[in-house]
Image (spheres, helix red, strand yellow):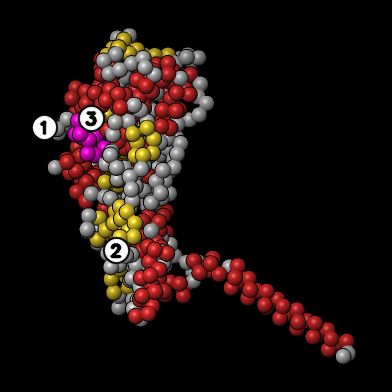
Amino acid sequence: MNKPIRTISLFCMLLFIALMANATYLQYWQADALNKDGRNRRIIQEAFSRERGPILVDGETVALSVKSDDAYKFQRTYPTPFRYAPVTGWFSYYSQTGIEQTQNDVLSGDDSRLFVTRLVDLVNGNNTKGGRVSLTLDPKAQKAAYDGLRALGEDVQGAVVAINPTTGQILANVSLPTYDPNVLASHDFASVSENYDRLNQDPAKPLLNRAIQTTLPPGSTFKLVTAAAAIESGNYDASSMVPAGATYQLPLTSGETGLVDNEGRSQCNPKRIPFEVAMEWSCNTTFAQLAIEVGAEAMQKQAEAFGFNEHYLDDLGPQAVSVYPTGTDKPQTGQTGFGQFEVRATPLQMAMVAAGIANGGTVMKPYLVDEVQSADLDILDKTTTTPLHDAVSPTTANELTKLMVATVNEGTADDARIDGIEVAGKTGTAQSGVPGKPPYAWFVSFAPADDPQVAVAVMIESVPGKDTSEIAGGALGGPIAKAVMEAVIR
């Protein structure tokens, strides 16, 4: 063989080796990634040509697939779009969010627990149907929360979470502003891209589930955690006298920057006042001093016992982790006592604080997926309740309940009163820390106080058109919490 032919032969052999290596790489190493790539039209065709399973709330379908008359066989549809969008999310040609994402394998029929069903369908020549996902949401509580927030104004930004204290079931998860997932599930891919870009670039962030993905200073609602730490120390109970005062200068500080006041609430002025009065009128000077007395380490431990600095929600995401800062000095610890400095919480987290107190001190792990079924209604899995932490002793929980009931009956949380039912609650108004920006309004509660069935957290991030003086957790959040509690109890 002469040299030119040998050179060409070697070159062709190298080409064949490169071709084989590339085919092996694509078919073996990259097969899974390519199979899941949203741009893979074969996968799109397959996904939209299969009857995806429904998402249900108390038997009501909130997401389902219906037959379509276009190139694809089924169209994903959301009958009650705006109310449930933060939970269901959407299923589109390029992505999934919410329950559509976390339960995708079940809904699509690809879950290993549906293997026998797929095998039977294959033998019979039937198209495989996806499984069914039932959620823990209470439709009446969800509607009450949604309507309550909407009533504050068209452009309100906020969230509501309700929890069953004894099980951890999430009964309501509402976030505003919201969106219509139907426009993101369309088979008109150009329209989907246009709508996604519009929603994603909206400064009001309608795609954000504020109930679990937004952390803000919880303000005075965090005083429940401070009170828990103080009572757990063994030095206080609901009938104790606690430190107070019209003002309090944080240690190691001077001037206005380190001065804590009570925003004109004269009930806080005496040097020592009953614990009930301090909670009823949300005395900042009391809780700053209690936090410093308890100490940074005990405050952090108590916050983490309620779920701060921890991920705990598995079936909806991503969950933002609520934060209690580590290594705080005395003035910083004092500020955390009334929910400021670097304390940040989601509405879900503050609902868990209320729920833990309601449940005798035990915080239950929150969950949204109640049951998973096959298309033939065979139960594949049912979530079991799981304790997350013993946050406080039953005795401490009882003392905290007394303080919260007094706050509703005699103090700032009176907007949550329900005729004939004893309610436990706490208001909060947190400074945003941004010059010129109004504070955030918070409200947490549970009822009935002697036999809790529901714990609620309301967070109102922004109400356009309202003056700073009009932003108050009791006035804005109390009526919403009341409506949600009534929806569950009655």
Residue position marked by numbered label 3 in the rendering: 424
Position of residue 81 in the picture relative to residue 235 (left or right): left
Of 246 and 220, the residue lying toward us: 220
Of 26 and 384, the residue lying toward us: 384
Q: Is residue 446 magenta?
A: yes
Q: Is residue 189 magenta?
A: no
Please, what is the three-letter code of the amino acid marked with disc 2? Asp
**Secondary structure found at label 3:** strand
- Residue under the point 29% across and 45% down: 169
Q: Name the mark nearer the viewer: 2 or 1.
A: 2
- Asked if residue 482 shows in the view, the reply is yes
The magenta-colored residue range is 439-456
Q: Name the mark nearer the viewer: 2 or 3.
A: 2
Q: Quadrant where the N terminus lies? A: bottom right
Residue situated furthest bottom in the rendering: 1
Residue position marked by numbered label 2 in the rendering: 378
- Residue under the point 38% across and 66% down: 114
Q: Position of residue 490 (x, y in %)?
A: 14, 42
The disc placed on residue 420 is: 1
Q: Marks 2/3: CA distance?
A: 40 Å
Dot placed on the residue nearer the N-terminal end, 2 or 3: 2
**Secondary structure found at label 2:** loop
Q: Position of residue 246 (x, y in %)?
A: 33, 13
